[in-house]
Amino acid sequence: MDQETVRTICHLARLKIDDEKSEKIESDLDTIIALIGGLSSFDTSNIEPLYSPLEQTAVKHEDVVNSDNCKDKYLANSPLSNDDYFLVPRVVE
Amino acid sequence: MSIQFKTITELREMLDSKIISSEELVNETFRLNEQFKELNCFVTLNESKSREKAIGIDQQDEPLSILSGIPLAQKDLFCTEGLRTTCSSKILSNFIPPYTATAVSKLEDDGSITIGKTNMDEFAMGSSNETSFFGPVHNPWKKGYVPGGSSGGSAAAVAAGIVPAATGTDTGGSIRQPAAHCGITGMKPTYGRVSRWGMVAFASSLDQAGPIARSAEDCAILLNSMSGYDSKDTTCLDLPNQDLLETINNPIKGLKIGVVKEFDMSDLDLGVQQAFEQSKKLYESLGAEFVEVSLPNISASVPAYYSIAPAECSSNLSRFDGIKFGHRTEDPGNLEELYVNSRSEGFGDEVKRRILIGTYALSAGFYDAYYKKAQQVRRLIKNDFVSAFESIDVIMTPTTPSTAFAFGSKGAQNPVELYLEDLFTISSNLAGLPAISIPHGQLNNLPIGLQLIGNFLEEGRILNAAHIFQKNSDFHLTHPNMEDFK
């Protein structure tokens, strides 16, 4: 796990690591990846992945409106909003 | 009469015989919490609404259910309408949910009183409660020692006798490990038994809510209430209602208990080994039979978990972007900076570490080697359990390799050291199986936990085995003297 790889995954995850912590993070990630790397010794030829213990596809619901308009409730938790929208810094100049 | 260390059943009797009112019970609960506030069990208290509900319940002629008027604590990962829900993270430190999690609603609909939200490892990522933004929780048995995690505040509040029971969530052992370290009983149900709706998601294919209490009987009471179909969680199983108390007293003569060949007990603390042997003898004296079983791929559990759980976490935690709710950085220059700075300021180190590992495992070029491979190994582990349960009824293991440890003594240099705390608990999450931890001894005045893993949907059987053990032993009746906190 070199600095460049850590920089790439930080970008993908939209995270920034403080300079003084970067060496420790790199070493921790190396240790954890080595742990996960141990899986390669298990023979999984012809084994289907088990993505959920239930092995069932998500249940589908009828496409009906079943709750009130909760706009105000949800906007209330936003750090910045007006009466109708979540607000973000200007995207288009 | 003191209510400290009372079970739900005992408090029910006190309420029914008018020895105490629900209002007095709630007041005494808050007094106990104030007395032992150094434990740091709670992030947020729900004082006025608790008193209001208790007064209303005292005016009812008949209790709604066995839980009516009983104070409970909820892990701060369950959304509670109008009551702050932080996941012990800075990023959610101001979040007031607009709705209540189904598991909590069910408990509240049965008359229980949510007295507050308990401290935990940030976003349930940890085994020591040391990753909380609100500071660590002390183990009631020894100051400066961890209560376990991630449901550490819930476990400590029950162990200290502040509340008779609490909710927890368990992704890799987060109910059972703290229950073991705090000398109480905690249960992870079958995946799909309890609705996950309103639980802040960590790893969606592993997370499951469950009870933490002073006995297996109280766990059954809580689980009876919490479980049941919920159309809002598409992984919640549609099953007929089951009263887990009906079978809890069944005799266990002939119960076949599996002991896992691959777990090398000689690696464990001597006290943990001795307690395990003593418990085997107790079960044998009650008519159970021990059978050695093989789970040949069990050693892959920890590495598989630390690929799958971070991968799911990196996806689930992408919703925290500083826009719709939660912490937002000040004066971002542009949208990208808003995302990056809000997340980087809001998440703690362990959460960042897991998001990065998960992002790496899911990224192009590594997906097959890490994520898909882990899910294939997960099937091998599940298949091992399916084979084992053809010849046995339950599996018995220690819950943890050792007892509670001092703050800062594990994982600071090497995070994997702390991950190995979950060695015995992780496999049941990967396979979706129910499992319970009960106290069964002590080492240097710190509790030791025993784990019973059941087959799919066989909560009744492990609660029965745990209850019969508790009827014939007194480990669950011991409690800390709290001298360190007076």
Image: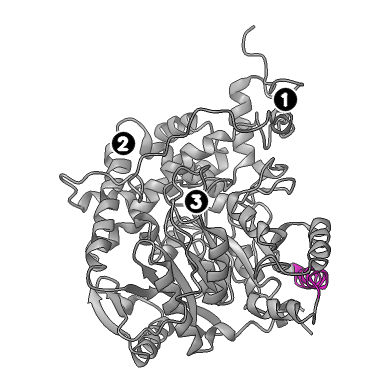
Viewer-nearest residue: B375 or B274: B375
| Residue marked by disc 3 | B229
| Residue marked by disc 1 | B331
Q: Quadrant of residue B128?
A: bottom right
Viewer-nearest residue: B373 or B267: B373
Place of residue B170 in the rendered image (x, y in percent of width and height, measured from the top left): 49, 58
**Distance from the alpha carbon under mark 2 to that under mark 1:** 36 Å
Q: Is residue B404 visible?
A: no
Task: Tell me if residue B154 comes above or below residue B346 in the rendering.
Answer: below
Viewer-nearest residue: B235 or B17: B17
Q: Chain of mark 2?
A: B
- Amino acid type indicated by mark 3: Tyr
Viewer-nearest residue: B3 or A18: B3
Q: Could you tell me which quadrant the N terminus of chain B lies in?
A: bottom right
B163 relative position to B262: left or right: right
Q: Chain of mark 3?
A: B
**Distance from the alpha carbon under mark 2 to that under mark 3:** 37 Å
Residue sitting at x 64%, y 40%: B346
- Amino acid type indicated by mark 1: Asp
Q: What secondary structure is the magenta-colored segment mainly?
A: helix
